[in-house]
Image (cartoon, grey):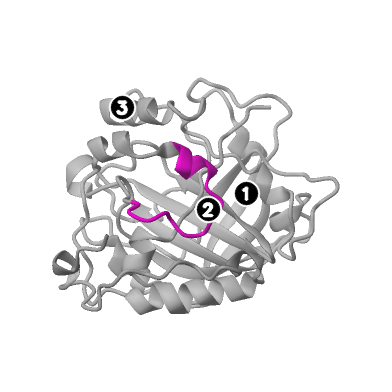
Amino acid sequence: MINSIKLQNFWPQARAFAPLPSDYANWSAQQKQVFLWNDRILSSTYVQNPPLQRIDIVGLLLTALTIKMDRREDEAPRRWRKAIHAHGSVAKIRFIAAADSPYTGLFKGVDHGLLRASVTGDPSDRGFAPGLAIKLFADGKPSGNFSALVSLSGQGQNHNFFANELSNIVPVVNEFGPKVTNLIFRRVTKYPTRIDLRHLGSLTQKGVKEEQAHTPTQVFLVPNPALKFAEAPHDFRDDFASIESGTRLLSLYAVNPLDKIEEEIGTAPYRQQAQCIGYLETTSNFVTSFYGDSQLFFRHQRFRNR
């Protein structure tokens, strides 16, 4: 339930959203993106950004993480609450594939998607830890989703969101906070620091099933070097508000090793083998909104080692 009193300084029109239309799942990729953007995200933009929240370990412990792993809808269930990555900025995007990319499905290119940029928690608490969640729409089928981090512990006091590359696989960190989070996620997945990408290669944006799907194991999201922000403490959401529609945001490098992803830190030099397979480009400005922070849902696909 939305607490309208608490939100009145940020979203004066605080109200509950009606359920998604009953036939939403059958819509085209474009229809889904337009509806979520116009009717949900833009209709609930903040008049001022809420303060960033600390990581809620207790809330994370009480979260039904099986929903995060298994739910295929684009909208979170009622009363869903983000214990981490509580506040972020969202933009419409498209993925433009490289001509020589060997990968199938959504990796062939996507015209309609959403990207949410956030930090794990209040940087003043545990440092600046950027994360990205990406949703790629398909006609009449569930969207493809994946997320990427710099690392579990972030990048210290460097507040430049694009100071480092991000990936769907990050090494285990021998620090108290990340270790606790890992243990919580291990209740539902053997590999809590990895996101599986295979569903992204099995279906095209037209909703057509690939007969012979070929999907990378790991992707590296490399920021556009022209997008450099201040390293001193500040609100990253202000930086994203300055990014214009039509900006090349990130290049995707991908690798599909024949061996298994190594368990130990620093034993797998996969970045050196990675091939550029395309880039993500914004097709709108970034906005902050109640819906983007509370109801827009990104699935975390369980990782299966090869």
Magenta stretch holds residue 74: yes
Horizontally, residue 108 falls left or right of residue 298, namely right
Residue 174 highlighted magenta (yes or no) = no
Q: Residue furthest front?
A: 22
Q: Amino acid at mark 3?
A: Val
Question: Which residue occupies 66% across, 67% down?
Answer: 26
- In the picture, the quarter occupied by the C terminus is top right
Q: Residue at x 33, y 36 (%)?
A: 153
- Tell which tag, 3 or 2, sits nearer the viewer: 3
Sequence order check: which comes first, mark 3 or mark 2?
A: 3
Residue 124 visible to the viewer? yes
Residue matched to label 3? 180
Query: SS of the residue at dot 1?
Result: strand
State the SS at label 2.
strand
Q: Are marks 3 and 1 in contact (CB under 8 Å)?
A: no
Mark-to-mark CA distance, 2 and 1: 7 Å
Residue at x 46%, y 69% (from the top left corner):
91
User: Which residue is depicted at the point 43% across and 65% down?
Assistant: 227
Q: Position of residue 45 (x, y in %)?
A: 32, 75
Q: Which mark is residue 253?
A: 1
Task: Reply above or below: 102 against 49.
Answer: above
Drawn side of residue 297 relative to residue 78, left or right: right
Q: Crowdedness of circle 2 by 10 Å Cα count: few (<14), some, many (20+)?
A: many
Residue type at mark 1 is Tyr
Does the residue at mark 2 contact the one at mark 1 (Cβ under 8 Å)? yes
Q: Label 2, on which residue?
A: 222
